[in-house]
């Protein structure tokens, strides 16, 4: 049985991580932490586990085997690296981090620790996507030469724990990126998985066209994005 600690108790932690750990016969939620104590208390009441006063306390606890990192994007790297250095397996929400160096440092920490580091690109495990991958890999339909992927929803202010346009998702210092890193990254990874090739080059256009803070000023990150991707195997496509 794996004892799991959940760091960050917002909507994704509650609806996906905690819910799925609860239904997994090999995991137990042993601890939770959130910068808003009431969220951590609510999570513990609903799913079990000890409420920790600090993230450092949770990570240092030797009874915790693995952690889910469900915090704002800017904090993915430091928390993940600290957890790996303390001998924990890590499931980190996407995006992996906000800079390439942060990503490389996370990989290095995982290598040194010998623990598993997983990034939550969950569209790879959808049954329909796995079947599509199988069909494409078989060559039955020929090779993929072009694709178009689109992903959108009403916005994080509608479903995040904040339930407000003041959500961290809209703030540059916490999120770094907007729709591209929240939604587009899912489809970019899915195309890599389905096509079986890595991205060779990319052209990206990010824009803030619609979303506003409560005071009427535009949010600090993109709410729309377009990417043109060329893959190493020659496939060409768009992600919006």
Image: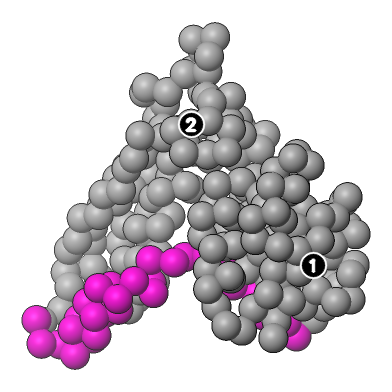
Instruction: Indicate yes or no whether the magenta region holds residue 195.
Output: no
Task: Give me the residue at 30% from left, 76% from top.
Answer: 127
Q: Kindly identify which numbered label has been placed on residue 113.
A: none
Pinpoint residue 239: horizontal percent, then vertical percent. Answer: 29, 51
Task: Give me the residue at 78% from left, 42% from top.
Answer: 37
Q: Is 96 on the left-hand or right-hand side of 226?
A: right
Q: Are marks 2 and 1 in contact (CB under 8 Å)?
A: no
Q: Residues within 10 Å of mark 1 (few under 14, many from 20)?
A: many
Q: CA distance from mark 2 to mark 1?
A: 29 Å
Which image quarter is the C terminus in?
Answer: top left
Q: Quadrant of residue 128?
A: bottom left
Look at the picture and state if 10 lies above or below 57.
above
Look at the picture and state if 150 lies above or below 120.
above
Q: Nearer the viewer, residue 163 or 102?
A: 163
Q: Earlier in the sequence, mark 2 or mark 1?
A: 1
Look at the picture and state if 146 lies above or below 39.
below
* Label 1 secondary element: helix
Task: Give me the residue at 24% from left, 85% from top.
Answer: 134
Q: Nearer the viewer, residue 178 or 64?
A: 64
Residue beneath label 2, please? 157
Q: Which residues are magenta?
A: 114-141
Residue beneath label 1, please? 83
Q: Nearer the viewer, residue 34 or 172?
A: 34
């Amino acid at each position: 049985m794996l004892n799991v600690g959940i760091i960050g108790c917002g909507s994704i932690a509650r609806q996906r991580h905690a819910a799925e750990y609860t239904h997994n016969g090999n995991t137990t939620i042993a601890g939770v932490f959130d910068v808003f104590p009431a969220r951590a208390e609510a999570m513990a009441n609903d799913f079990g586990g000890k409420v920790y006063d600090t993230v450092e306390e949770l990570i240092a606890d030797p009874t915790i085997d693995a952690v889910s990192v469900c915090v704002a994007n800017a904090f993915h790297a430091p928390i993940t690296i600290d957890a790996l250095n303390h001998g924990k397996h890590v499931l980190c929400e996407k995006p992996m981090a906000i800079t390439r160096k942060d990503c490389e440092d996370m990989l290095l920490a995982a290598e040194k620790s010998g623990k598993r580091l997983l990034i939550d690109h969950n569209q790879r495990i959808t049954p329909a996507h796995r079947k599509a991958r199988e069909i494409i890999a078989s060559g039955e339909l020929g090779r993929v030469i072009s694709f178009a992927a689109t992903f959108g929803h009403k916005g994080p202010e509608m479903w995040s724990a904040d339930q407000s346009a003041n959500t961290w998702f809209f703030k540059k210092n916490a999120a770094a990126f907007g729709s591209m890193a929240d939604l587009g990254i899912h489809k970019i990874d899915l195309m890599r998985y389905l096509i079986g090739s890595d991205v060779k080059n990319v052209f990206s256009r990010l824009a803030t066209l619609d979303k506003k803070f409560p005071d009427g000023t535009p949010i600090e990150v993109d709410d729309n994005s377009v990417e043109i991707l060329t893959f190493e195997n020659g496939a060409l496509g768009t992600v919006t």
